[in-house]
Amino acid sequence: MGVELFYPEFEVVRNYDRCIACRVCERQCANEVHSLLESKGIMISDESKCVNCQRCVALCPTRALKIVKSNCTLRENANWQNDTIREIYKQAQSGGILLSSMGNPKPLPVYWDKILINASQVTNPPIDPLREPMETRVFLGKKPERVQRDETGALKCELPPQLELTMPIMFSAMSYGSLSYNAHASLARAAEKLGILYNTGEGGLHEDFLRYGKNTIVQVASGRFGVHEGYLRSGAAIEIKMGQGAKPGIGGHLPGTKIVGDVSRTRMIPEGTDAISPAPHHDIYSIEDLRQLVFSLKEATEYQKPVIVKVAAVHNIAAIASGIARSGADIIAIDGFRGGTGAAPTRIRDNVGIPIELALAAVDQRLRDEGIRNSISLVVGGSIRNASDVVKAIALGADAVYIATAGLIALGCHLCRTCQTGRCNWGIATQRPDLVRRLNPDIGCERLVNLLTAWQHEIMEMMGGMGINSIEALRGNRLMLRGIGLTGKELEILGIAHAGE
Amino acid sequence: MRIDATELDFSALNRAIRTSEPACEITGCLGQRFIAAGMDDIDVTIEGIPGNALGAYLNGGTITVRGNAQDAVGDTMNAGRIVIHGNVGDAAGYAMRGGEIYIRKNAGYRAGIHMKAYRDKVPVMIIGGVAGSFLGEYQAGGLILVLGLERGNRRIVHNFPCTGMHGGKMILRDECQDVIFPSQVDVRKADEQDRAEIRAVLTPYCACFGLDLDDMMDAPFTVVTPSGTNPYQQLYIAN
């Protein structure tokens, strides 16, 4: 210890008038914060291990516990903040790269919160979704530019493969390995019940989940873990992962300690070995090379599955997206810089990439300008937090959104941001059987279904308010949006007017 | 069954292979990509030059090329055998998990990159001539064997072999005095057990190409393995 000693970040406040020393907190905490002091028969805590996941607070039967942010901090300094100093101590001690979990927590602009949605008044009256039909169904995939007829004048109805979603929302890639079996089971079942899709991430596919195939997107990333012919055929679509919003430009690394049992089986690598996904696909150095991977996947699956190319939102995203649209991909997924992760270097998560709102607006506009918007569907993720974010994303030009963190929160995640430890007390980001059991997939599925059913209702209400009865009529309809407190440049990129204009 | 590929694009050629009998011979192949991608239970012989990603995601069967092949041969293949009588381009056997790739002559950059192994699946790539730079980069499993035949004064492998290697084994038929290996691998002379393993994997290879097994074995072999399976573990500190 010594110079780097820091008072713990959180304090465990225990109300001894209420505590009955039942030891629930002790059993529930995988971080081993709580223990019984046998000599006095009272519970004590080691705050230095606390990650503020609130598990003990939630399960304490007498509500005797509270976790609060410690006010024992260094002298206030707007430049050298406590976290900054703490990180320096950690690195001075270890020489390691700082590793964090979940999305960027920094106070950077959230443009969704600076965009307002329109509603009809007097003319073009609002529609009541409780009384009138309201279409939230979307189809993802290439669309023909124009109606085509054969020699006899009959319509040509053959379309490239499409994904049908009951609402413009999908669960984005989270691998089995970063998530627990029960978390994956919850997502897969919910996707089936909701008529949407979930995504395997780069962790392969557990055989128990094969039956959710038509609601599954299988991912192919640079490490190609678990990728084989049967895997490619078992999903409804194939996603090539080029990048991730939380860590653009770098690869993935699941430590050998997490490659155990079934996780080793689905990734098809031996137990205990590191699963390293290199930063690039080493066979992709150009759009032409990407096209080669897209078509090798299409050939291997006989053109039955749409191919998604997922990239992180980076500075030149519009040009990149234009290239992807020309690579033969059916869908492009863009992940913004607030996107979540099971583990990413802190510096990269917090400093690399751009907000999804700006990336989306820039990409949609670029594809329209080039006349290729219909040749590809656009899915965006990277912190879609609620139904109004969804509506704003659609109005900015997205065909659908990817959500992940919101889904995990529905499953019980309290955003303590320590997934990388593998000791998730909520049974979500862990492989420890005793912890995994805490997440009941029946309840998990139900909560996810509840969440998205509620969002769907809210989306319909907002659409109805705008006098729009089909999500298709909302897509790219930027007249329905106004900016608030944005600069001229921001409004220009977003392609929206300021409130009052 | 014979398939004339002269007028066929890659999709049409693959459809022809899928609908033909398992054993078929493709003539007039002129750079068609993705031949036999994702297939199994096939026995395809190719006259001419197949394009990139030959046998990608191959899941069984045999592909024989009576000439050179281009980039990404056997990309992510899971089972089966690909036999190339000439040279291959870059990134051969990318992330292959099972089966064999036998190359009679030379391989380009990044051969065997991210090759892995799992349970009974232990992929084998044998390169008869020399290999380009980054051989076995990120290798996580399986066996890469380079023979260095007819190499003149060229090094058996070019720069940066085994970068990021964390599993499997690489064997070079040479003393490798002029090859620089990274620090996280162990390099040693082949012992008797290694030589028995080499003999076993070379037997079918020599049969494919009509080479003399004893001649092949009559040389020094260098064996390279990673020093640990978690070479990058210490790089991080939880924040």
Image (spheres, coloured by chain):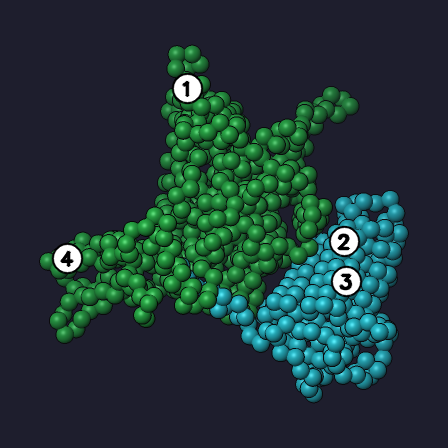
Image coordinates for residue A259, horizontal then vertical, percent: 49, 66
User: Which colour represents chain A?
Assistant: green
Label 3 or label 1, whichever lies nearer to me, is 1
Residue B52 bears which disc, if any?
2
Amino acid type of the residue that numbered disc 1 sits on in the rendered structure: Gly
Residue at x 72% of width, y 46% of height:
A288
Pinpoint the chain carrying mark 3.
Answer: B
Which chain is cyan in the picture?
B
Q: Quadrant of the C terminus of chain B?
A: bottom left
Q: Which residue is mark 4?
A: A15
Mark pair 2, 3: CA separation: 13 Å
Mark 2 vs 3, N-terminal side? 2
Mark pair 1, 2: CA separation: 56 Å
Residues at marks 3 and 4, common chain?
A: no
Label 4 or label 2, whichever lies nearer to me, is 4
Residue A500 bears which disc, if any?
1
Pinpoint the chain carrying mark 1.
Answer: A
Q: Are marks 4 and 1 in contact (CB under 8 Å)?
A: no
Residue B108 bears which disc, if any?
3
The one nearer the camera, B152 or B59, is B152
Can residue A460 be spotted in the picture?
no
